[in-house]
Amino acid sequence: MPKPRTPNKPTYRNISMQVTVTLILLLASLFVILSGQYDPNSQHWAFATVGTILGYWLKGRR
C-alpha cells in the first residue's frame, strides 16, 4: 500500500522558485531605492515590496 503524500511538504522546486522570485523582486526594489532617480510613488512601491519580502521570509514555516 503506497504512503499518502503530505500536501504541505516543500519540494526543491518550490523553494527554488520562491528564492528566484524573491531575488528578482528584491534586486529591482533595491535598484529603485538606491538609484535615487525615481519618483516617490515608485520608491513607495519599492519599500513596500522589500517589507513584504522580509515579512514573508521572517514569518517562518508553520
Image (spheres, rainbow, N blue to C red):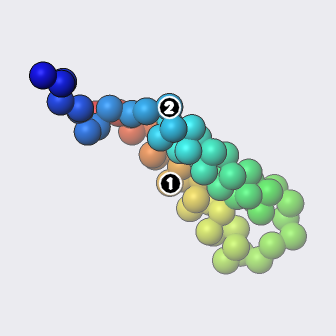
The residue to which callout 2 is attached is 12
**Residue that protrudes farthest toward the left in the picture:** 1
**Which one is closest to the eye, mark 1 or mark 2?**
2
Estimate the spatial distance between the alpha carbons at disc 1 and disc 2, rounded to whole Å.
Answer: 23 Å
Q: Position of residue 54 (x, y in %)?
A: 52, 44
What number of labels is visible? 2
Instruction: Tell me the quadrant of the picture where the C terminus can be found.
Output: top left
Decide if residue 3 is on the left or right side of residue 41: left
Kind of residue indicated by mark 1: Thr
Decide if residue 62 is on the left or right side of residue 33: left
Decide if residue 47 is on the left or right side of residue 57: right
Q: Residue at x 77, y 77 (%)?
A: 39
The residue to which callout 1 is attached is 52
Earlier residue among tags 1 and 2: 2
Q: Residues within 10 Å of mark 2 (few under 14, many from 20)?
A: few
Q: Residues within 10 Å of mark 1 (few under 14, many from 20)?
A: few
Name above or below for residue 59 compared with residue 21.
above
Q: Are marks 1 and 2 in contact (CB under 8 Å)?
A: no
Kind of residue indicated by mark 2: Tyr
For label 2, the SS is helix
Name above or below for residue 52 compared with residue 46.
above
Q: Position of residue 4 (x, y in %)?
A: 18, 30
Instruction: Tell me the quadrant of the picture where the N terminus can be found.
Output: top left
Q: Residue at x 65, y 63 (%)?
A: 46
For label 1, the SS is helix
Q: Position of residue 57 (x, y in %)?
A: 48, 39
